[in-house]
Amino acid sequence: MSSSRGVSTIVLIGIVIIILVAAIAGAYLATRGGGGTTTTTPTSTATTTQPQTTTTTTTTTSTTTTSTTTTTTTTTTTTQAQGVTLTILTRHSTDILDLARKMFLNSTIAKQYNIVDLQFIVVPPGLWPDTAKAKNVDLGWGGGPTLFDTMYLYNLTSPLTLPLALNASAQIPDQIAGVPMKRVGPNGQLYWVAAAISSFGFTVNTDLAKQYNLPIPQKWEDLGSLSLGKVYASTGQAPLAMADPTSSTSNTRMYEIILQAFGWDKGWRLLTLMAANAYISSSSEEVRDVVIRGERIVGITIDFYGYTAHYQNPSCIYVIPQNESIVNGDPIALFATSKHPVEAQAFIAWVLTDGQKIWLDKNINRLPANPSIFNTTEGLARQDLYQAYLAASQTPSINFSDNLALSYEYIMQNYFKATLTDDVQYLQNAWVALVKAYTSGKIDQTRFQQLENALTDFITFTNPLNGQNTTLTQDVAIQLNNAAMSNPSLLQGLMSQWRTAAAQKYQAVLQAVGG
């Protein structure tokens, strides 16, 4: 019995020894990299970073001999930098703005600079300075050089510094038809650059002109003529359309052209006679549209309104008064109020290059400032616009001074509004009565000329700066300009004087002809 127990004990000890040896051998082989029964793929982490986006992916996989289990854990974290919305003050029409937004947001530049939207603000020119400051506006686009020079004088424009924008600006000619296309400050830096060019003249509905046996007007003086006055007197419908300068920068520029082409005194007499023949609108677009519809014979317009009028109504033609007009650059500029100056300058660069294709659209018809756009496929398809560009660039221009125009612009706009726009009914009652008296033989030519001169004479008013009675000479206008810009109550006092004196003048002429 005891011997059998001994044998069992020996067997048990042997089994234990065998197990221990096997375990030791397995451990030894494992440390030597020998074959094993379990394979584990370590965790791997990959991180990829692209502009404005960071993506992190983590993958873990494990496998065993008895069963295969694959576990994949993917964690993706995307951080999108907040896109930039540019705020833009503009005088452009909705069709231009809609096309610009569509084209630009699909552009490489928009994506590169993470610009996700364009917010356009359209307000009258007089509200631009306050709006720019209140809304942190990034840039201005369209509205004519006088408006942008006003912003420049208010220190609300900033010079271009981004190489992309400066390189694009270099593609724009410094002058076209002798007129500057850029505003360069005394420091040599660029404060605005033309994004399009414009000439100034009038659009004529030739069918309507023929209906009244009128020759096609060719000069500014034709718009203040007795011939148009006779049409007004016989029909009761003002044959001319023009816009109030306080609400139209393009019409402001045309009135400044007339004042410099004819001189201050004769220029104001002509403007008065034009207003006597005119329906005065608050919108330059409406001036164009009433001619297209055949409601007025002629309207003073910027060139592309004339091209659009012809496109919509082939009986309409655009006329540039020879040796009585200029070519203008229509600017784009970075504003000092911008919170996104780099992105704003990227947009400017686009407008001056690929964005020039906007003007080629047949519903827009503007003249590009960058002539190289006519070498593109789209440009080659618009030979009509290219010929218009060549004609405008070769138009004989008057010797026009931007600085002189700017020195009296604010007073000019408001004197026009007070004496011509606001008092237009008094003016036209007197003018129509005068024309009827002359055409009926009631008065002779000498008397007609005397009363026409009285109708167009400057009024007398008290100068608030020195208390003296005066007329609005060019020098007085320049003296009053800055004071009126900085003192609204002074301007309102002047306008009240001007309205009253002008109404009295017109009524005196009406009484003189027995009206």
Image (spheres, rainbow, N blue to C red):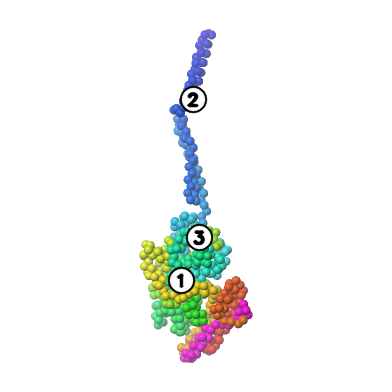
Mark 1, residues whose alpha carbon is within 10 Å: few (<14), some, or many (≥20)?
Answer: some
Q: Earlier in the sequence, mark 3 or mark 2?
A: 2
Above or below residue 22? Residue 197 is below
Q: Residue at x 44, y 77 (%)?
A: 324
The residue at which mark 3 appears reads as: 161
- Which of label 3 and label 2 is nearer to you? 3
Q: Residue furthest front?
A: 187
- Tell whether position 263 is magenta: no
Instruction: Estimate how packed mark 2 is, as few (under 14), some (14 to 19) or many (20 or more) residues with alpha carbons within 10 Å.
Output: few
Whether tag 3 and tag 2 are in contact, CB under 8 A, the answer is no
Residue placed under numbered mark 2 in the picture: 27
Which of marks 1 and 3 precedes in the sequence? 3
Taking depth in this image into account, of 298 and 324 the one nearest to the observer is 324
Q: Position of residue 469 (x, y in %)?
A: 60, 82
Q: Position of residue 212 (x, y in %)?
A: 41, 82
Compute the Cα span from label 3 to label 2.
72 Å
Please identify the residue farthest to the right as the structure is shown.
Answer: 467
Magenta segment boundaries in residue numbering? 441-467
Q: Kindly identify the residue that appears in the image at 51 percent across and 51 percent down.
A: 80
Instruction: Give residue 179's mark.
Output: 1
Q: Mark 2 is on which residue type?
A: Ala
Give the total of numbered labels: 3
